[in-house]
């Protein structure tokens, strides 16, 4: 059997349990072990993994298609399998790699942080990545929004290499609008990596596994911005457990995304202010030219021949982090409290406090001229920077509940994948979870992985949206039960309101949409009505226009064509 096909079959059969496959391959080399032997080691007895091993020919098509794009599969024990990753007890059994595998054997630094990063956070990520790439390190991150994307772009700006570790299969790029960035990484000599099989959708539970690869490939992990409860802190803890260096960039006491970095610094992470802080952590390396604090703000420094190259030549595991000397202002006890942090309800669950009235409403982006979208006319009265929409999006991603204008009335919104946030929204609205909720997306592509659509249905929706029409679609397993309720389908819409679409785009996922009212009460049609009825329970109210002449969106079952609400 072709070696690449066999590795793909093993990847598909054991995904997402690649660490188990890794432990098996330490004792049983893939080229010397028949596929049938692996059937007894499968983590479950589902028919699909077993079929993969009994009928490997089924994967000839995916192998041909993905190989044509440059993907290849490396098994633990192969000569070109990344050596640092191979040292881990939970190393992936098989890695899919697009690009030159030699990059994965060279010196890498991981850079992680918030998806909804501040402007300072993305700027720091870009500048540090650019300087460290110029010093000879490959910059490794996860291709996510915010810090990840800035790190990849910073490395590319220096003419360096960067590695993107995916939390899904090799046949898709997530988020979809980073396809161009992924292509730029390949064209710049970088690498895409995943342990997941073709067809694997990006799922929340996959990202911690993805993060262990990000840190495991690297000599050290840099945390740029992180909340106290974030995947970035999980990655930092994983890096420390792997014996890697951990660095954290200090930030403002008033920025909630600095709290995670400050905790890491208190726990012994390396203080990071300049490129020299990274180079010195790996030994007595000569200083980087111009490596004074703040030097990352200047032009990209020249390549430093003794830094990453010397580290790669020694090819040793980094030592334990030295205890940093914290400046006095880190011991002042000041805290950066984000609006709504820390209040608990009677059951002890965390909930966000409403922000002060001074920041309760924001002027969000609306178009500068009237917009007519399939019969719905919205006349804008305010125009402001997109930064306000990013603020609203940040509140949603932090677990908040907001109100925002939709086509005809104000809606309540939150992160549909955050169960606590959804249940809080339902409690505010006094709506039983069994009824389900509508999702609003920025475009059809944002629904990838959430709904099942054939080509004809997809084309029909492209023609229909954006519009005040909600469709019932067959839901995938990624749609949580608290969104579907008791229904097998999920109600989704690409809103006719440009602000609602822009908000979903800023969040990066579809958002919940349900009218802003309590049970038995009329929905609010402007921010004043919403503020009077619900303001004390909300974290944010976005100012915008609704069409007072409109009516609730039509609801249609796409498969049957039946209209449930007109």
Image: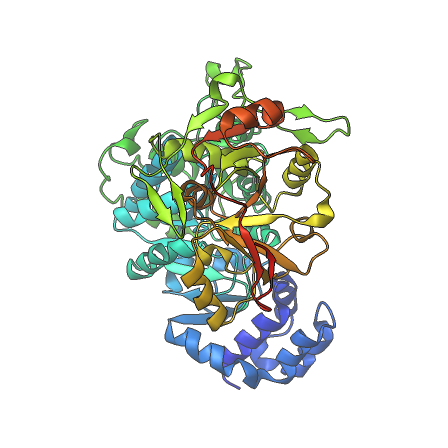
Given residues 77 and 541, the one toward you in this image is 541
Given residues 440 and 242, the one toward you in this image is 440
Q: Which corner quadrant holds the C terminus?
A: bottom right
Given residues 73 and 398, the one toward you in this image is 398
Q: State the image coordinates of residue 166 (x, y, percent, origin top left).
A: 48, 57
Q: Is residue 290 left or right of residue 439?
A: left
Q: Is residue 41 above or below residue 444?
A: below
Task: Name the image colouring.
Answer: rainbow
Q: State the image coordinates of residue 433 (x, y, percent, origin top left).
A: 72, 45
Q: Quadrant of residue 420?
A: top right
Q: State the image coordinates of residue 174 (x, y, percent, origin top left).
A: 46, 56
How many numbered tags mark residues here? 0
- Does residue 310 appear anywhere in the picture? no
- Does residue 180 appear anywhere in the picture? yes
Q: Is residue 397 left or right of residue 109?
A: right
Q: Residue furthest front?
A: 549
Q: Is residue 140 above or below residue 503?
A: below
Q: Is residue 559 above or below residue 506?
A: below
Q: State the image coordinates of residue 226 (x, y, percent, origin top left).
A: 51, 34
Given residues 247 and 320, the one toward you in this image is 247
Q: Quadrant of residue 183?
A: bottom left
Q: Is residue 266 above or below residue 515?
A: above
């Amino acid at each position: 059997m072709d070696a690449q096909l066999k590795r793909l079959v093993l990847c598909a059969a054991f995904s997402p349990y690649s660490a188990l496959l890794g432990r098996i391959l330490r004792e049983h080399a893939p080229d010397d072990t028949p596929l049938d032997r692996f059937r007894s080691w499968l983590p479950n007895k589902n028919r699909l993994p077993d079929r993969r091993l009994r009928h490997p020919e089924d994967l000839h098509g995916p192998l041909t298609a993905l190989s044509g794009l440059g993907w290849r599969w490396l098994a633990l024990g192969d000569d070109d399998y990344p050596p640092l990753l191979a040292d881990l007890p939970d190393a992936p059994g098989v890695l899919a790699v697009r690009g030159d595998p030699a990059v994965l054997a060279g010196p890498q630094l991981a850079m992680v942080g918030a998806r909804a990063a501040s402007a300072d956070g993305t700027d720091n990520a870009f500048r540090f990545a650019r300087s460290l790439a110029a010093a000879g390190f490959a910059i490794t991150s996860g291709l996510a929004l915010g810090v990840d994307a800035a790190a990849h772009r910073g490395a590319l700006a220096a003419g360096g290499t960067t590695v993107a570790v995916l939390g899904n299969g090799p046949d898709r790029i997530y988020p979809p609008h980073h396809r161009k960035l992924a292509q730029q990484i390949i064209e710049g000599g970088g690498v895409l990596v995943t342990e997941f099989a073709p067809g694997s959708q990006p799922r929340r539970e996959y990202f911690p596994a993805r993060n262990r690869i990000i840190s495991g490939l690297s000599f050290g992990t840099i945390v740029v911005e992180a909340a106290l409860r974030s995947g970035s802190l999980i990655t930092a803890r994983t890096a420390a457990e792997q014996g890697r260096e951990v660095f954290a960039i200090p930030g403002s006491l008033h920025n909630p995304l600095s709290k995670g970095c400050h905790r890491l610094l208190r726990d012994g992470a390396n203080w990071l202010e300049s490129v020299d802080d990274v180079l010195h952590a790996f030994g007595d390396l000569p200083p980087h030219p111009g490596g004074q604090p703040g030097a990352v703000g200047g032009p990209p420094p020249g390549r430093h021949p003794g830094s990453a190259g010397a580290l790669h030549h020694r090819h040793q595991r980094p030592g334990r982090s030295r205890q940093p000397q914290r400046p006095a202002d880190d011991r002042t006890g000041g805290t950066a409290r984000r609006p709504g942090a820390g209040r608990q309800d009677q059951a002890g669950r965390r909930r966000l406090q409403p922000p002060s009235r001074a920041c309760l409403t924001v002027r969000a982006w609306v178009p500068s001229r009237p917009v007519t979208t399939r019969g719905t006319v919205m006349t804008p009265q305010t125009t402001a920077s997109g930064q306000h929409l990013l603020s609203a999006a940040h509140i949603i991603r932090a677990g908040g509940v907001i109100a925002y204008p939709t086509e005809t009335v104000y809606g309540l919104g939150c992160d549909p994948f955050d169960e606590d946030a959804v249940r809080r929204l339902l409690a505010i609205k006094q709506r039983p979870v069994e009824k389900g909720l509508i999702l609003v997306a920025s475009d059809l592509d944002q629904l990838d992985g959430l709904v099942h659509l054939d080509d004809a249905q997809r084309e029909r929706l492209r023609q229909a949206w954006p519009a005040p029409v909600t469709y019932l679609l067959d839901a995938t397993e990624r749609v949580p039960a608290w969104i579907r309720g008791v229904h097998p389908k999920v109600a989704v819409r690409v809103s006719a309101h440009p602000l609602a679409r822009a908000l979903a785009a800023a969040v990066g996922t579809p958002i919940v949409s349900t009218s802003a009212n309590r049970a038995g009460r009329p929905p609010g049609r402007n921010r004043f009505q919403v503020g009077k009825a619900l303001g004390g329970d909300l974290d944010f109210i976005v100012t915008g226009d609704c069409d007072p002449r409109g009516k609730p969106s039509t609801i249609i079952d796409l498969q049957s064509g039946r209209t449930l609400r007109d």
